[in-house]
Amino acid sequence: MNKILLGKTGISVSRLCFGALTIGPLQANMSIDEGSSIIAHALTQGINFIDTAQLYGTYPYIKQAIKKSRITPVISTKSYAYSREQAKASLEQARSALDIDVIDIFMLHEQESELTMKGHQEALDYYLNQKELGKIRAVGVSTHAIEVVNVASLKKEIDIIAPMLNMRGLGIIDGTLHEMEAAISKAKNMGKV
């Protein structure tokens, strides 16, 4: 499996990322044994990158997949936390539930605008502090908004942007597919994706 460096983080990931949402309670609702077997298979085939979130309820699947495969992947997780207390709880939940000391990538989940990002600044500051302490390797935002991709591209403290992108532009909340592609290109030039 081909690997790439993720932005300027120095984190090497497979080009293909396993999106854990699909196996968990919010979608397929597989048993932990079945879902973890699928993830473990992906890991043994060279996929070393898993996307999850606090909301997805998939930490137990990932933890079990790591035990089955004996491979620890790069894990990117997200939280809707907006306060320091919520951010702390979300990080500690991820570390404990995954049985991992350092979370590779921790993101503010589904930021909708620059204003939304400002509303989550306290949580972002907490994650940045934890990055300095070595509990997080990279900090970022996930979004369906072109505005957020553009704003986050200019913020030096943001390491990673995970934007919504698909062939039809479905789910982009503030523009077209081509506008999102242009914003992502700008973010890539800034070393954010």
Image: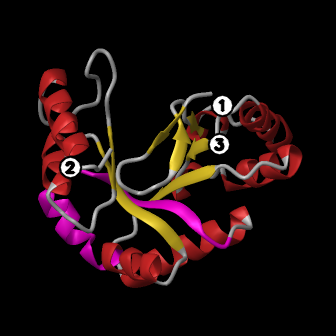
Q: Is residue 26 visible?
A: no
Q: Position of residue 15 (x, y in %)?
A: 51, 31
* Mark 2, residue position: 190
Residue 116 vs 51, above or below: the answer is below
- Marks 3, 2: nearer the viewer: 2
Residue 136 vs 1, above or below: the answer is below
Residue at screen point 54% across, 58% down: 54
Q: Which mark is residue 28?
A: 1
At label 1, the amino acid type is Ala
* Mark 3, residue position: 25
Marks 2 and 1: CB-CB under 8 Å?
no
Residue 84: in magenta span: no
- Label 1: element kind: loop
**Looking at the figure, which quarter contains the C terminus?**
top left
Q: Residues within 10 Å of mark 1 (few under 14, many from 20)?
A: few
Q: Which sits in the foreground, 30 or 154?
A: 154
Please report whichever mark, 2 or 1, sits nearer to the chain's N-terminal start.
1
Q: Which residues are magenta?
A: 101-123
Residue at screen point 62% across, 27% down: 1
At label 2, the amino acid type is Met
Between the C-alphas of marks 3 and 2, the distance is 36 Å
- Label 3: element kind: loop
Q: Is residue 82 left or right of residue 14?
A: left
Residue at screen point 36% across, 48% down: 7
User: Going by the picture, which residue comes out furthest to the top?
Assistant: 168
Q: Which mark is residue 97?
A: none
Please report whichever mark, 3 or 2, sits nearer to the chain's N-terminal start.
3
Residue 157 vs 185, above or below: the answer is below
